[in-house]
Image (spheres, rainbow, N blue to C red):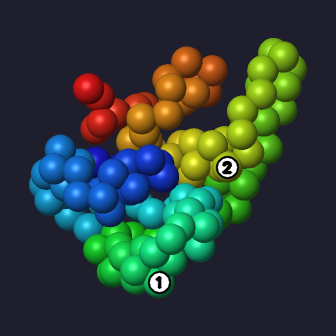
Amino acid sequence: MIRVLDTNTFVASLNGNAKVLQRLDALHPEDVILCAPVLGELVYGACCSAREAENLAKIEELLTRTRFEELSLGAAFRFGELKASLRKRGRTKDDFDLAIAAVALDLEAVLVSDDTDFHDGAIPGVRFENWLER
């Protein structure tokens, strides 16, 4: 099963979270997706950190252990449909969160996130796992 990891899960792995690293070790690298919106968030965080070069190097290394996915045509359409559907229901979500969910839907993958905003049922069809549950 393919898994699209959200930023918080990748950050936990980069920080050495044993639970997340154990789950990642059990998967084939091709089944672990680092998508463009998540990469953007990771690079932003690294550039704002006190250890910018070290954190950017960690991200570069992460790219060798995962499958990178751009925002495909299918995911772009899903993003627009999701955003419109939420707006019609009077709901909003962060655009990057919607783009990450759209990638997961487009790939028929599980979205791995600790972000409670994803777990409210507002995005139909997305399957979730939380590897950081306490």
The spot of residue 117 in percent (x, y) is 57, 27
* Mark positioned earlier in the residue sequence (2 or 1): 1
Residues under numbered marks 2 and 1 in contact, where contact means CB atoms less than 8 Å apart = no
Q: Which of the pair 121/94 is nearer the observer?
A: 94
**In the image, which disc is placed on residue 93?**
none
* Label 1: which secondary element: helix
Please tell me in which quadrant of the rendered image residue 95 appears.
Answer: top right
Give the total of numbered labels: 2
33 up-or-down from 88: above or below: below
The spot of residue 61 in percent (x, y) is 34, 80
Q: Which of the pair 108/104 is nearer the observer?
A: 104
Q: Dot 2, crowdedness within 10 Å: few (<14), some or many (≥20)?
A: some
Residue drawn at point x = 46 percent, y = 75 percent:
51
Which three-letter amino acid code belongs to the residue tagged 2?
Answer: Phe
User: What's the distance in space between the residues labelled 2 and 1, CA to CA?
Assistant: 24 Å
* Label 2: which secondary element: helix
Which three-letter amino acid code belongs to the residue tagged 1?
Answer: Ala
**In the image, which disc is placed on residue 96?**
2
* 86 left or right of 30 in image: right
Residue positioned most to the front = 50
Which residue position holds label 1?
53
The spot of residue 10 in percent (x, y) is 38, 56
Of the 4 image quadrants, the one containing the C terminus is top left
The spot of residue 47 in percent (x, y) is 59, 73
Judged by depth in the image, the label closer to the viewer, 2 or 1, is: 1
* 92 left or right of 56 in image: right
Q: Is residue 107 visible?
A: no
Q: Is residue 17 visible?
A: yes
124 up-or-down from 105: above or below: above
Residue drawn at point x = 77 percent, y = 28 percent:
92
Q: Dot 1, crowdedness within 10 Å: few (<14), some or many (≥20)?
A: few
Residue drawn at point x = 79 percent, y = 44 percent:
80
